[in-house]
C-alpha cells in the first residue's frame, strides 16, 4: 500500500527538482501528472502539469515547481509497476494513459533539430 505523505517542501524552498525515475500519465479530462520514484523507493505524483518544455526536457506543474528530466522514462519492470500503482492510488484513478514514451520521443526530436 502506498501512502500520500506530503513530505515535499514548499515550492518556495524547493523550486526545482532533478528526476531520474519518472513516468507521465494523462487523465481522461486531459490533465497530465508526473509520477516520480525517489531514492528510497518513495513514489510521488505531482500536481497537474502546466507545461512541458520539450527542448530543455523540463516539466512545470501548477504548483510552480520545475522538474528536470535527466533520463528517459523509467523502463524497469518493477519500477514501472510502482509508478503505475502510485498513479492509480494517489490520483484515485485506474484509467490513466501513460504518455511517457511519446513525450520523451518528442523531446529527443526537438533536441536533434
Image (cartoon, rainbow, N blue to C red):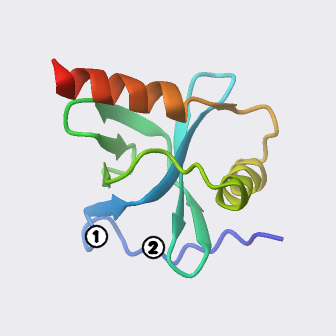
Q: Secondary structure at mark 2?
A: loop
Residue at far bottom of view: 40
Q: What residue is at 72 percent from the left and 61 percent from the top?
A: 78
Question: Quarter of the image containing the N terminus?
Answer: bottom right
**Rendering coords of residue 26 (x, y %):** 60, 30
Mark 1 crowdedness (10 Å alpha carbons): few <14, some 14-19, many ≥20: few
Q: How many marks?
A: 2
Disc 2 to disc 1, how far (Cα)?
A: 8 Å
If you read the primary sequence from the N terminus, does the residue marked by circle 2 or circle 1 appear first? Answer: 2
Residue for badge 2: 8
Image quarter for residue 51? top left
Question: Quarter of the image containing the C terminus?
Answer: top left
Image-based side of 43 in relation to 107, left or right: right
**Rendering coords of residue 72 (x, y %):** 42, 45
Question: 111 above or below 18?
Answer: above
Q: Say which of 1 and 92 sits in front.
A: 1
Asked whether the beta carbons under mark 2 and mark 1 sit within 8 Å of each other, the answer is yes
Q: Say which of 50 and 54 sits in front.
A: 54
Question: 106 above or below 66?
Answer: above
Residue at far top of view: 113
Q: Say which of 34 and 91 sits in front.
A: 34
Q: What residue is at 52 percent from the left and 31 percent from the top?
A: 101
Q: What residue is at 34 percent from the left and 42 percent from the top?
A: 59
Q: Secondary structure at mark 1?
A: loop
Residue for badge 1: 14
- Checking the image for residue 95, the label placed there is none
**Rendering coords of residue 28 (x, y %):** 69, 23
Image-based side of 76 in relation to 60, left or right: right
Image-based side of 70 in relation to 25, left or right: left
Image quarter for residue 76? bottom right
Amino acid at each position: 500500500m502506498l501512502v500520500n505523505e506530503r513530505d515535499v517542501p514548499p515550492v518556495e524552498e524547493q523550486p526545482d527538482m532533478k528526476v531520474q525515475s519518472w513516468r507521465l500519465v494523462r487523465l481522461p479530462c486531459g490533465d497530465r501528472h508526473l509520477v516520480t520514484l525517489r531514492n528510497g523507493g518513495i513514489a510521488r505524483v505531482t500536481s497537474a502539469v502546466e507545461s512541458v518544455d520539450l527542448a530543455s526536457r523540463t516539466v512545470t506543474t501548477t504548483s510552480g515547481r520545475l522538474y528536470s528530466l535527466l533520463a528517459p522514462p523509467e523502463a524497469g519492470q518493477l519500477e514501472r509497476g510502482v509508478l503505475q500503482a502510485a498513479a492509480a492510488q494517489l490520483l484515485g484513478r485506474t484509467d490513466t494513459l501513460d504518455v511517457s514514451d511519446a513525450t520523451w520521443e518528442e523531446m529527443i526530436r526537438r533536441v536533434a533539430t
